Image (cartoon, rainbow, N blue to C red):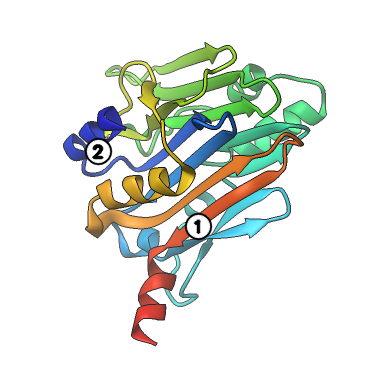
Amino acid sequence: MEKLLSYLARNTYPGRAILMGRLADSRPFLSFVLTGKRKESLNRVIRKTEDGIRLEFYDEKIKGNSKILIYNPLRIFEGKAILSNGNQSDTIKESLENWDTFTSAMFLHKADDDRPGNSKIAGILDLRNGDLKMSVLKKDEDGVDERFFYNYERIIDGRAFFISSYSAPGVPFTGEPLKIRCETDLGTIHRTIWNAIAAEHRISLYSAAFGGDCSISEEIVTNRLIEEKAQKA
């Protein structure tokens, strides 16, 4: 985890981030990191759904642009976990339902014109054999869409890959996904990531591991606003 800790120490605002791979005990796992700056962005929590997770506003009096801030980061479909920082997860699931592919689904998306520093990121992890595909979509310095795809076959135990919206504040993700050693348990990984995120930007963190039947065998959800309310009660 040292490489990830070093990355988060340098990059105090990663935006949204995803980590996908295998635990030391061979179980496939993933983590979704949610950070923010503006009060509307910070006013969000992760809620569990029948096939994944969804972002929702916590205080109904403080709402922002729901088209950008509210989406389903995680969708689980036919033995595959789909994770992204936007509605890419829905598009990918719909493509798979129609016998299409992860790659073709990402080509349905364009990089953000109004947020040139943002990267649209996504990953799909096969929960049966450990195959992983990741994608980064962003604008280059000339405003042209750049698309990067990464394929990892049968990830070994204790390895995972990490990508985020930003490599630095306002700078899209640069380079290949970070290869991370995760030779520990899910709870330790979850706590390590949460504690490494700059406190002022923390919103939520979700981590899950999957059993042999591709169902969730362990999951952890940390929502800053809910925890703060519980501490005041």
Could you say which is closer to the camera, residue 88 or residue 131?
Answer: 131
Q: Is residue 154 visible?
A: yes
Q: Residue furthest right?
A: 98
Image point (37%, 16%), residue name: 176
Q: Residue furthest bottom?
A: 233
Q: Position of residue 30 (x, y in %)?
A: 52, 38
Could you say which is closer to the camera, residue 193 or residue 23?
Answer: 23
Which residue in the structure is indicated by mark 2?
A: 8
Between discs 1 and 2, the one toward the N terminus: 2
Q: Position of residue 173 (x, y in %)?
A: 33, 26
When the figure is inspected, residue 145 is found, relative to residue 114, above or below; the finding is above
Image point (59%, 33%), residue name: 27
Q: Which mark is residue 221?
A: 1
Amino acid type for the residue under numbered disc 2: Leu
Q: Residues within 10 Å of mark 2 (few under 14, many from 20)?
A: some
96 on left or right of 17 = right
When the figure is inspected, residue 151 is found, relative to residue 69, above or below; the finding is above
Q: Quadrant of residue 163?
A: top left
- The mark tally for this picture is 2
Q: Position of residue 152 (x, y in %)?
A: 53, 13
